[in-house]
Image (cartoon, grey):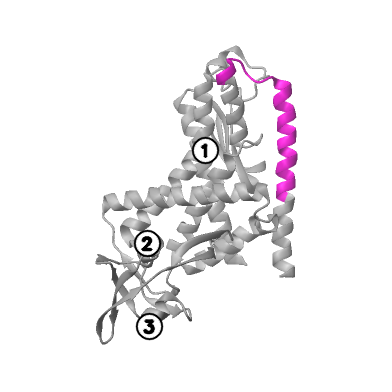
């Protein structure tokens, strides 16, 4: 329990700091004054004032915020502070300041994935056969457990992903498969079959397969500097894309809301990753950071995405959204956020005590 709590605070602290630092850095870049930079909510625990900014650690660690000068449109300001006011900046500068939070969460993930890829490489699943489905094309062709597929139609195969993709794109034509066994190289012919399978989201997809599963063997592939950069952006993009799909399917009902987890689930997962090692913990931080960015970009008032929506409307119409409309939207957004928090805590408690 102690490991989970400690890992949770580390994960949350890093994510919140980078998110709020994004807002802070771009705000200062555009000359906006920052009154408070807080990790946590509620009463101030410790801190230090530098200029007009109070850098503080607050008592409730479940979040953070940056309080800018003139953040609220109806806020009364000393005339001397107007040049530092967020509201008085051009709408496109305000858009960039708000967008910087989620952007920095994405960049944090890119940096973590880059460092891991550069120094540790990436794990590749070997194209080694584990099990063979009875009556499948692989069974008919004579594939055996432990066979390592080295080529398909003369094209070298160095990963399970490449093998599966090659078979899937075969359109059912016969394939010449080269296999490495203990007693030497073997060649065989297999005709893929078109079947329905389910992906990670439980969706039914149809593709060509030969009826084999992986043995689960992996190897580490070293990457050079530029390959590591590409891999870091590739992984970040894939996680963001998956998160967008998951959020969309939650709202359409294709994924049940009881699968959603909250702080307790994150704490448990963080503890497990911390026990697995520093690299695993930081990979977990990167994944959660991307998730946080995507969620914050949802067009829900009180989230960054809600503010961006109002500013985009202002940019299109040439005038701000009325204060009354914004207040009503903020209240609705707050109710939705509280309902979501209740739901995830309920799911967490149900998993913890009743599963």
Residue depicted at x 38% and y 59%: 169
Marks 3 and 2 sit apart, C-alpha to C-alpha, by 22 Å
Identify the image quadrant of residue 319: top right
**Do we see residue 14 in this rendering?**
no
Q: Nearer the viewer, residue 148 or 19?
A: 148
- Residue extent of the magenta highlight: 315-341
Residue depicted at x 39% and y 61%: 165
Residue, disc 1? 101
Q: Residue 211: horizontal and vertical position, in percent? A: 45, 73
Residue, disc 3? 144
Residue 344, numbered circle: none
Mark 1 vs 3, N-terminal side: 1
- Name the quadrant of the C terminus: bottom right
Q: Nearer the viewer, mark 2 or mark 1?
A: 2
The residue carrying pointer 3 sits among few (fewer than 14), some (14 to 19) or many (20 or more) residues within 10 Å by Cα, namely some
The kind of secondary structure the magenta stretch mainly shows is: helix
């Amino acid at each position: 329990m102690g490991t989970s709590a400690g890992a949770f605070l580390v994960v949350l602290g890093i994510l919140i700091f980078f998110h709020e630092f994004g807002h802070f850095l771009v705000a200062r870049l555009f000359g906006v004054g920052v009154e408070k930079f807080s990790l946590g909510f509620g009463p101030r625990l410790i801190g230090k004032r530098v200029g007009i900014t109070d850098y503080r650690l607050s008592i409730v660690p479940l979040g953070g915020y940056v309080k800018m000068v003139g953040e609220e449109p109806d806020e009364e300001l000393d005339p001397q502070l107007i040049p530092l006011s967020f509201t008085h900046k051009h709408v496109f500068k305000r858009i960039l300041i708000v967008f910087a939070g989620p952007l920095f969460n994405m960049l944090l993930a890119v940096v973590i994935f880059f460092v891991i890829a550069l120094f540790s490489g990436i794990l590749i699943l070997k194209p080694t056969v584990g099990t063979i489905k009875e009556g499948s094309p692989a069974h008919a062709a004579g594939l055996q457990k432990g066979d390592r597929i080295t080529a398909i139609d003369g094209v070298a195969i160095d990963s399970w992903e490449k093998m599966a993709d090659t078979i899937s794109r075969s359109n059912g034509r016969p394939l010449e498969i080269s296999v490495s066994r203990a007693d030497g190289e073997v060649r065989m012919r297999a005709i893929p079959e078109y079947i329905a399978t389910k992906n990670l989201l439980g969706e039914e997809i149809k593709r060509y397969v030969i009826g084999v599963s992986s043995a689960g063997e992996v190897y580490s592939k070293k990457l050079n500097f530029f390959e590591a950069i590409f891999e870091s952006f590739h992984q970040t993009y894939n996680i963001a894309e998956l998160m967008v799909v998951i959020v969309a399917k939650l709202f359409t009902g294709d994924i049940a809301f009881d699968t959603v987890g909250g702080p307790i689930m994150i704490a448990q997962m963080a503890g497990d990753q911390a026990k697995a090692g520093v690299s695993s913990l930081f990979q977990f931080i990167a994944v959660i950071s991307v998730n946080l960015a995507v969620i914050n970009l949802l067009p829900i008032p009180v989230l960054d995405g809600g503010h961006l929506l109002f500013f985009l409307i202002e940019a299109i119409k040439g005038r701000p959204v009325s204060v009354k409309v914004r207040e009503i939207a903020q209240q609705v957004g707050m109710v939705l956020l509280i309902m979501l928090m209740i739901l995830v805590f309920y799911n967490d408690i149900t998993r913890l005590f009743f599963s």
